[in-house]
Image (cartoon, grey):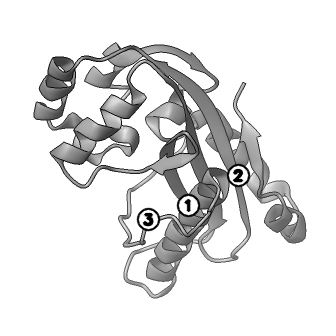
Amino acid sequence: MVGAHFATLPVDVDERPLPDEHPETHVVRLATAKAYAAQAKVQSGEIEGAAGDVIVGADTVVVVDRVILGKPADAAEAARMLAVLSGRVHEVWTGLFLLEAFDGSAIGEAVRSIVKFAPLDAEAIRRYVETGEPLDKAGAYAVQGRGALFVEAIEGSYTNVVGLPLSYLKHFLQILPDLPLLDRLRAGGSRESK
């Protein structure tokens, strides 16, 4: 969709929030850590890479009542998360961090969308959790899957709610090669998707 060829490279990063960490800071920190962990694998030769390769780190969380909801640990936690989201409005934050594999230049940002959830009864939550879909999703739902049935409205980027804000990714891929290194490092911040 964004005109890029890619490969996925899983890395091991502790995704727990730091004490009193704001959601936008949290997701950018994790996206940055993931990108640098992948860069280390490329630079060490563990993974093949070439000059000009761009590493994309991303992390998404759901936030309700200023509490960060990551991926549920189990089915019971998924059900609790869905009950909290039921009939309410919440935020979805994604941190996006692009890093050139060998020259180290980078740009990153946090993107926010707002989601209104339909009211869910206990039976609907139970049936959804039994599908297994919510078990590896931030906030215990997948808007691109069966979880779409629970979403009444989205303000901002739909692809941000999926977990990768494609319009921002495309924009960053276009500007990364043209920015001076110092400006790229200063470009991190947060933005609401409109």
Image height of 108 relative to 118, above or below: below
Identify the residue at horizontal 39%, vertical 76% (top origin): 47
Q: Give the secondary structure at mark 3.
A: loop
| Label whose residue precedes the other's in the sequence (2 or 3) | 3
From the top left corner, tell me how far across and down residue 39 is, in percent.
53, 75
Image height of 26 relative to 71, above or below: below
Frontmost residue, 43 versus 87: 87
Frontmost residue, 154 versus 99: 154
Label 1 sits on residue: 31
Badge 1: few (under 14), some or many (20 or more) residues near its Cα, within 10 Å? many
Label 2 sits on residue: 109
User: In terms of image quadrants, where is residue 127?
Assistant: top left
Q: Which mark is residue 150?
A: none
In-image side of 125 versus 31 (left or right): left
User: In terms of image quadrants, where is residue 121?
Assistant: top left
Label 3 sits on residue: 15
Which mark is in front, 3 or 1? 3
